[in-house]
Image (cartoon, grey):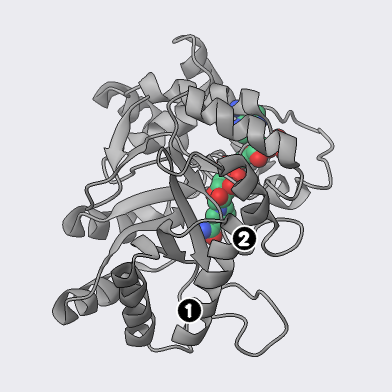
């Protein structure tokens, strides 16, 4: 396994991480334990969850607390706040009020005294960003949170936040988690240039396009109801043609398209970890294989040509 710094911070995370949004939804406790232990065996130390993940809000964090028991000094755990967690008017958003109650609820569910990386899940247009940043800074100062991150922020929102934090002497976002994969490359226009300039880490989500980029779906396949919303938008003839060409590219190298999808993201130096979701332990091992593939400049050029043909 290779490791990179979590953005502009000193802590190191595995370049392959584990996305945990299926845990507590389609993955039960024994499945979660198998995934976590296989990940550790593969050298993976980075796990991504959120308050909202699971069949009911909090279910992913609650199940993961059992799987993480006794492991907290070996792993880097990220969770998120901002989603609607209850019926109350203040049970959502990035207000100081909700962040402070949200962190306590996540710590209770995770059965931990700290969260390694705490993300704001999405920009909150109704809360002054100063209020959000000051609350996050206080959480870092109190030791409840070690690092902070943004998610689904535009480049100007990242720049505004981190410049403000720098001016006020507050903790800055060390990473941003954004949708980024071979079929969604909007990030390359504004966010990645900003991230390179500001030394901000990028954690791509949806790296396998919901599984489509593993090549597991064939033309005309029926998609299971638990996957249909995530995968169906990608099942176009153009995408299948691209997938065929990516398959030729990887077959010549005795690799898989899934490995390429991950290695291609890691070709961008600002990407610190690729958090593919997994529904079983074997998927963890399959995805971990991408760690030893560093694309050459020629390979990256060839892939780009395939994606843009
Ligand atoms: N910040 C945000 O707003 C946001 C939004 C979405 C996701 N996320 C995070 O990003 C993570 C990754 O996204 P994602 O899980 O939705 O999408 P993904 O990583 O693109 O796809 C993961 C899915 O693909 C299938 N899969 C994974 N590895 C495989 C393999 N080796 N072979 C065959 N199938 C494989 C599994 O589903 P099946 O077994 O069901 O096919 C798995 O659940 C999430 O877990 C979550 O932590 C964040």
Q: Is residue 94 left or right of residue 210?
A: left
For marks 2 and 1 on the same chain, the one whose residue lies earlier in the sequence: 1
- Tell me what residue is drawn at x 53 percent, y 19 percent: 256
Q: CA distance from mark 2 to mark 1?
A: 15 Å
Mark 1 and mark 2 in contact (Cβ < 8 Å)?
Answer: no
Quarter of the rendered image showing ligand 1:
top right
Q: Out of 185 and 72, give the one closest to the viewer.
A: 72
Q: Which residue is mark 2?
A: 109
Q: Vertical placement of 154 versus 182: above or below?
A: below
Q: Quadrant of the C terminus?
A: top left
Q: Which residue is mark 1?
A: 100
Residue 247 % position (x, y): 55, 20
- Tell me what residue is drawn at x 84 percent, y 47 percent: 225
Residue 57 % position (x, y): 70, 65
Q: Is residue 98 visible?
A: yes
Name the element at disc 2.
helix
- Tell me what residue is drawn at x 59 percent, y 72 percent: 83
């Amino acid at each position: 396994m290779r490791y990179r710094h979590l953005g502009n911070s000193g802590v190191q995370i595995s370049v392959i991480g584990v996305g945990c949004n299926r845990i507590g939804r389609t993955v039960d406790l024994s499945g979660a334990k198998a995934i976590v232990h296989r990940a550790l065996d593969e050298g993976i130390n980075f796990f991504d969850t959120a308050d909202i993940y699971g069949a009911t809000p909090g279910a992913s964090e609650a199940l993961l607390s059992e799987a993480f028991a006794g492991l907290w000094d070996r792993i880097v755990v990220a969770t998120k706040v901002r989603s609607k967690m209850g019926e109350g008017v203040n049970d959502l958003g990035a207000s100081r009020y909700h962040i402070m109650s949200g962190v306590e609820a996540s710590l209770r569910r995770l059965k931990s005294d700290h969260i390694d990386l705490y993300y704001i899940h999405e920009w909150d247009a109704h809360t002054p960003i100063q209020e959000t940043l000051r609350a996050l800074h206080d959480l870092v100062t109190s030791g409840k949170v070690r690092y902070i991150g943004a998610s689904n922020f535009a480049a100007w929102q990242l720049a505004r936040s981190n410049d403000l934090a720098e001016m006020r002497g507050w903790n800055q976002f060390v990473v941003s988690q954004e949708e980024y994969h071979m079929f969604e490359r909007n990030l390359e226009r504004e966010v990645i240039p900003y991230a390179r300039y500001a030394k901000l880490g990028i954690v791509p989500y949806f790296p396998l396009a919901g599984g489509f980029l593993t090549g597991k779906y064939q033309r005309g396949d029926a998609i299971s109801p638990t996957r249909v919303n995530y995968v169906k938008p990608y099942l176009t003839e153009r995408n299948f043609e691209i997938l065929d060409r990516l398959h030729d590219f990887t077959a010549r190298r005795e690799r898989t398209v899934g490995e390429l999808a991950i290695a291609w993201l890691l070709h961008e130096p600002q990407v610190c970890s690729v958090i593919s979701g997994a529904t079983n332990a074997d998927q963890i091992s399959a995805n971990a294989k991408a760690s030893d593939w560093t694309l050459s400049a020629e390979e990256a050029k060839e892939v780009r040509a395939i994606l843009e043909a």
